[in-house]
Image: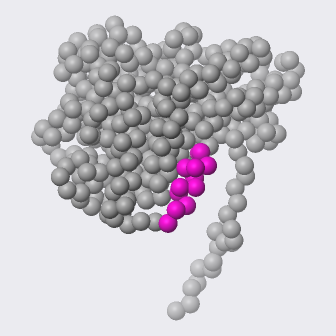
Amino acid sequence: VVTNVTAPEGPSGVLHVPPRLLMGPGPANSHPRVLAAQTLPLLGHMHPPFFKIMDEIQQGLRYVFQTNSKHVLMVSGTGHAGMEACIANLLEPGETIVVGNNGIWGSRVCDLAERYQAKVVNLQKEPGQTYSKDDLSKALEEHKPAVLFLTQGESSTGTHQNLAGVGELCRKHGTLLLVDTVCSLGGVPLFSDAWEVDAIYSGSQKCLAAPPGGAPLFFGERAFEKLQSRKSKVASYYFDLNLVGDYWGWYDKRFYHHTGMTSTWYGMREALALVANEGLDNMWARHQAVADHLWAGLRELNLEPFVEKPEDRLITVNTIKIPEGVDPVALVTNAMEKYNLEISGGLGGTVGKVWRVGLMGYNAKMENVEMVLAAFRDGLKKQGRL
Ligand code: GLV
């Protein structure tokens, strides 16, 4: 037999990619130690040395989530996989979820929850706003939902949702609190146990300084009990946490569910070792310091935050108002062409209204802020604005 489809020219030879400093909403550049770990020889996904790596990842996750819960693991997939795993497992058909929808992640959760046949109450807010305890208390009172969803760091709008006290509120109504921390985990304070959060998902590619592909997941005691007492089977096989949890040692014996992402988990183990080495307090302080430095420089360029209230502003993904008459795309293109630097435009409700600058993980460094400020200065000068 002779092949009649010829070998392609594209995937031949050695792959090269252009250098990029990724200062948008993510992925951020990975730490070199994480990338190096991903080149180590493969182990089998059921080999004891690999289980040891999975155990170490879980220890690292407990630290970064600030929890003593046994029920943490990495979902094989991006942050969206974490989102889907939480929705698929926490809700049964016909149950109600109240969704804090002040940006794209709330919209996605509305869509996902509908697909899993939940009743969705869309608690819509304008981009740039967050939820007060009063807003949430009213919604819980009225709808008595099984789950309340909030996004800690809304990367499409640049808001930071205050979570303190929300868990307590949820408990009063028998509601589980589910939180998206994709762009905030490791960058801003989070105390899963102390704040009585029930379930959280995140992503590997932002403040944790690893490539995309892993979704840290946390289930507290009440979320785990819900999983155990479901009347209906979880509608997704791949995301069924009874089965995935089995593979991650939640129960007595490990069971093969899917092939663990060997190299990705090597990187994740290294990323979490870096978090442990630096210390979470130091990490949070570093993210705050670079954000303060960014805003001091932006204000000198007469640029302003999109989010009105200072206490609602997210420091890991910063949204900057586009001034009247400025061409936002020209500035972004200039940053890429001249500096190999990614600055991003808006997403969803913020398209055309903001630029987004990420200060996350390995990229949360003063010299990177200087580079971003230089690109803004240059881009604005080119448009006669300085
Ligand atoms: C992705 O997380 C984005 O906000 O663009």
Percent coordinates x, y for residue 350 in the rendering: 58, 24
**Residue 282 visible somewhere in the drawing:** yes
Q: For the view shown, which residue lies furthest in the front direction?
A: 277
Relative to 251, is 296 above or below? above
Is 112 in front, or is 157? Answer: 157
**Residue 303 visible somewhere in the drawing:** no
Relative to 50, is 132 above or below? above
Residue drawn at (39%, 54%), measured in percent from left and top? 53
Is 244 left or right of 305, judged from the image as shown? left
Is 305 left or right of 375, judged from the image as shown? left
Highlighted range, magenta:
30-41
Question: Is residue 34 in the magenta section?
Answer: yes
Is 345 left or right of 256, judged from the image as shown? right
Relative to 27, is 364 above or below? above
Locate residue 138: give its quadrant: top left
Q: For the view shown, which residue lies furthest in the bottom direction?
A: 1
Is 314 left or right of 46, judged from the image as shown? right
